[in-house]
Image: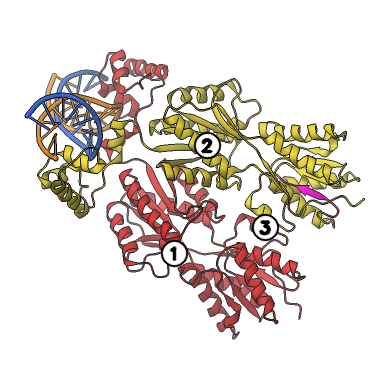
Chain colours: A yellow, B red, C blue, D orange
Amino acid sequence: MKPVTIYDIAKEAGVSVATVSRVLNNSAPVKHETRDKIKDLIQKYQFQPNALARSLLKKETGTIGIIFPDITNPFFPMLLAGLEEEARSKGYHFFLCDTVSTMGQMEDQYERESQYISILMEKQVDGIIMVGGRINLARPSKELTTEVAETAKRVPVLLINGQLPGTDLNRIYADERLGAELATQHLIDLGHRRIAFAGGYRFMSNSVQRIQGFRKTMERNGLAVRPEWTLVTGYSADSGKEAFETLHSMGELPTAVFCANDQIAIGMLKAARKAGLKVPEDLSLVGFDDIPYASYSIPELTTVSLRSYEVGRSALDLLHRMIGKEKVSKRTVVKPELIVRESTAPPRC
Amino acid sequence: MKPVTIYDIAKEAGVSVATVSRVLNNSAPVKHETRDKIKDLIQKYQFQPNALARSLLKKETGTIGIIFPDITNPFFPMLLAGLEEEARSKGYHFFLCDTVSTMGQMEDQYERESQYISILMEKQVDGIIMVGGRINLARPSKELTTEVAETAKRVPVLLINGQLPGTDLNRIYADERLGAELATQHLIDLGHRRIAFAGGYRFMSNSVQRIQGFRKTMERNGLAVRPEWTLVTGYSADSGKEAFETLHSMGELPTAVFCANDQIAIGMLKAARKAGLKVPEDLSLVGFDDIPYASYSIPELTTVSLRSYEVGRSALDLLHRMIGKEKVSKRTVVKPELIVRESTAPPRC
DNA sequence: CTGAAAGCGCTAACAG
DNA sequence: CTGTTAGCGCTTTCAG
């Protein structure tokens, strides 16, 4: 019952382990006859070479680690799918490291990122990809930053859609500010002038960028950004509902809301509906991220795609080249895309 | 720049590698003084032991492989979250093996499952979890079955929500037939008599079970199952739309439809809306799986939860015990739960 | 409490 | 074309 090794094969074939290794890896010519015999034995015993031994020697595992917050957040599956697709074609495999747990405090999350970084190093991954978590903090602590910078000296590290100020880590990201501009301009072009912003967190840099893009576009068009219409309430559907209620309770409603992500837009859509408003006739809504549900909802959500699938593919390609010690540009930026669907229309009045 | 090893630490501490190993693993008493010195050195060099070397020796990696179809399918994130949660508490890490690619043919998928099985074996995982794919086939080929049965002799294998006829592989699964019965009975209890079934595939065993549960419940209530109202069209939102159109084109509509999953229900909801029907007033819809979108939609979907999160947690616990050579029951079944929301109501007439 | 030494399974020179 | 051999970095007896 003991697993068969290269030695067992070698002995039974009457050759040395070197020869078996050679046929395994096709690393040197082997006489046809012996090669066939060895292949038969491999088949017979269903021999699988031990990748640990191999990697120990070769100092490469064909494995990369992905550290990210939460598989349950609909933003990630597309990104992962892109990574997977490209990883497959290049022969890499993944350690998935999900840092958010059911009862997650934020601190736990960063703590867990640290643990995973360390575990991935022990497991000798060829590279590490990080997305979300500390790299989305507007002002990450020194320790959080240093830790990543230090690991990046030992193994290629790539940040997706985030950054660590004061470091020159490789990164690939969607231009969130541009995305916000696109969304806001779309609303303005439709004729909206009273536009609110909803969602996000002030302590997250991507939220900040979305707000900035919104603000900048409003100002460029000579429109006022009302502070009471800038509702930084979080990223969940519930927070979208909340935001709507706040808006609603203030008497005068905007004619359009730019939501910091699709879940918020969905929450807002439901709340607006409940309050007797029609979307888009009474209220235009644009989301952000283009999660799959955006096209399932009624009406379908106008939103901004960060093109996560492509970002995923490019990210893996970049990391692969970093692993191969190629020179790659430190920053790769991906242009987001406005997806106009049914939740936006000209204002009524 | 070469990574520091246990030898480097040992030399600088003036002790043998054995001692360093002992403090690393707390595997034997070490004099306080030397222990401290070693710990300092570890800190100083940020030494990380090489898990490959360790695993090579110990014959365990703390790693388990998950083979599943498609991260992009909203059914899986919850399952994975449950697996993750439990894995974390037990110190396991995951190899994620996604078998569906963008342009996937079914055959490619099974082929890829085979590849992954083999790779996971080489990487010396402590156990393998399979979900979806070949284990959902109503009639899997002999080769597909044998391959899994053979690997199960070498490493613990657990099947989630699936099976391989003719084997006694360990499995954990939700009782899909019961789930279908719950859904159908709910509709009947509401007063519906003209009920259709939509979605699924005849070649997938879980579809078949859902259909059977539906059929059985209809018959038990003395209701007719009309063949032309049993639309086995697939699992996508588009197929739900299609199914509705077929139904609609036939003149007489059912008052309720049991959809084989939530995406179908969503597609049908959209199509019904477009045709001027109100859900649930004109048409009641019940979905299956309780994916996150189910509670985002308007109206919120009545559906059946397979409790994937809990299934995930239990699955990992089971596998853990299998790895520890404990006796576990071959089959664990989880009771699904009917989630009544807004998409079902008594029929109008 | 500590060190020496024997591997875990495989690859890669280096000789032949 | 093939065999010998020296490790990869770590754990674990077995002696002290």
Q: Of the two numbered discs 2 and 3 on the same chain, state the one appearing first in sequence.
A: 3
Name the kind of residue labelled 3 in the image: Tyr
Q: Is residue A286 magenta?
A: yes
Task: Look at the numbered disc 2 and give the secondary structure of its residue.
Answer: helix
Do pointers 1 and 2 mark residues of a single chain? no
Residue in the image at 73% along x and 50% along y? A340
In the drawing, does residue A156 fall left or right of residue B191?
A: left
Up-down relation of residue B338 to residue B40 (above or below) = below
> Could you say which quadrant of the image residue A165 lies in?
top right
Local crowd at mark 2 within 10 Å, few (<14), some, or many (≥20)?
many
- Residue depicted at x 71% and y 32%: A208
Number of marks present in the image shown = 3
Task: Identify the residue under disc 3.
Answer: A296
Mark 1, Cα crowd under 10 Å, few <14 / some 14-19 / many 20+, is: many
**Mark 1 vs mark 3, CA separation in Å:** 26 Å
- Is residue A323 or residue B176 the one in the foreground? A323
Reading the image, the residue beneath label 1 is: B136
Which numbered dot is residue A69? none
Q: Which residues are magenta?
A: A281-287
- On whether residue A285 falls in the magenta region, the answer is yes
Image depth: mark 1 or mark 2 in front: 2
